[in-house]
Amino acid sequence: MPKLDLAKAPVKTGSLYPAPYAGQMAGRSSIRLGDLAGLTQFGVNIVTLEPGAVASLRHWHLNEDEFGMVLEGELILVEDEGETVMRPGDCAAWKAGVANGHRFVNRSDAPTRFLIVGSKATEEVATYSDVDMKLHIAGDKARFTYQDGSDWAGPRDLAPKGERNG
Amino acid sequence: MPKLDLAKAPVKTGSLYPAPYAGQMAGRSSIRLGDLAGLTQFGVNIVTLEPGAVASLRHWHLNEDEFGMVLEGELILVEDEGETVMRPGDCAAWKAGVANGHRFVNRSDAPTRFLIVGSKATEEVATYSDVDMKLHIAGDKARFTYQDGSDWAGPRDLAPKGERNG
């Protein structure tokens, strides 16, 4: 397949998260390059974060490797150990099953862009580090629970660990 | 895991190809970011091509999705349909099993760099489009054959299809 026409890639805005977390994802959008190319084994997205926007809740994946590279602007990578400033060309990666919640945050005055690659496992659990929530994916079904596995029924913050949300 | 220290990533030079194809890969090196981070589900490499260097024989993968993004310089993407000039930020992707041989070539006067991501399948066959050769990978074993499956015992060019090698 020749060069991808990024203008033709599906654009994702909004969030799968329940309220109030979905609303915290305002200012984030992503173009789905892997979907454009018909890839099925891993996702490849270019995410744009407007000033003040965050890429996700801080999370880690049970079954999916993940890799990110900053393309434009200055981002803050927030993890258990603290914060790291990331600039174009800087890379980070998260091996499946390592319980270190991470997210990118744009605290600058300019839009930022990063490339993110993640495996597509048929069964997956994402654990959120700062709120009492997990996402369970099985095939095309997604379900949120508290971290004890019971059905999610509204926000419960955890004690601060690294950065707080909102 | 915080920002990757690219200077600590394993560097690969040389080639798995048998002679004379290994020698055609001179001027190519790659840093193995996925290996540095302990990822096992897909590889992530930054490949540097010196002026005149090529990234590979033209090939396609039976079982592994692949994605590339140009980071620096001007590359030529060679595929069945012809050639495409690729510049920083340009992306291309190759879905597993699509029989369209591809490779990057640096015909410029400056070094080029690109990011390449590929699934790690336990069983894989790479088919080379311009020479009579296939690579079979099973676990950690690699074996070259002719395209009819018989043991490889020396170079045989195919009729020109797209670009010729060497």
Image (cartoon, coloured by chain):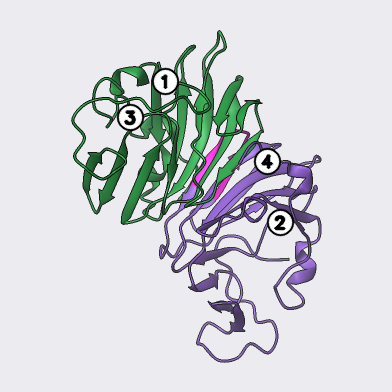
Chain colours: A green, B purple
Q: Which residue is mark 4?
A: B4
Residue at x 18%, y 30% (from the top left corner) = A153
Q: Secondary structure at mark 2?
A: loop
| Residue in the picture at 73% in, 47% down | B107
Contact? badges 3 and 4 (CB < 8 Å): no
Residue drawn 71% across the image and 56% down it = B54
Q: Amino acid at mark 4?
A: Leu
In front: label 3 or label 1: 1
Q: Which residue is mark 1?
A: A165
Q: Along the line of sight, which residue is nearer the eye, A151 or A16?
A: A151
Determine contact: label 2, label 1, CB under 8 Å. Answer: no
Name the secondary structure under disc 4.
loop
Nearer to us: label 3 or label 4? 4
- Nearer-the-camera pick, B117 or A57: A57
Categorize mark 2 by other alpha carbons within 10 Å: few (<14), some (14-19), many (20+).
many
How far apart in space, not on screen, are marks 4 and 2 (Cα)?
26 Å
Residue type pointed to by label 3? Lys
Q: Could you say which disc has been placed on residue A12 in the image?
A: 3
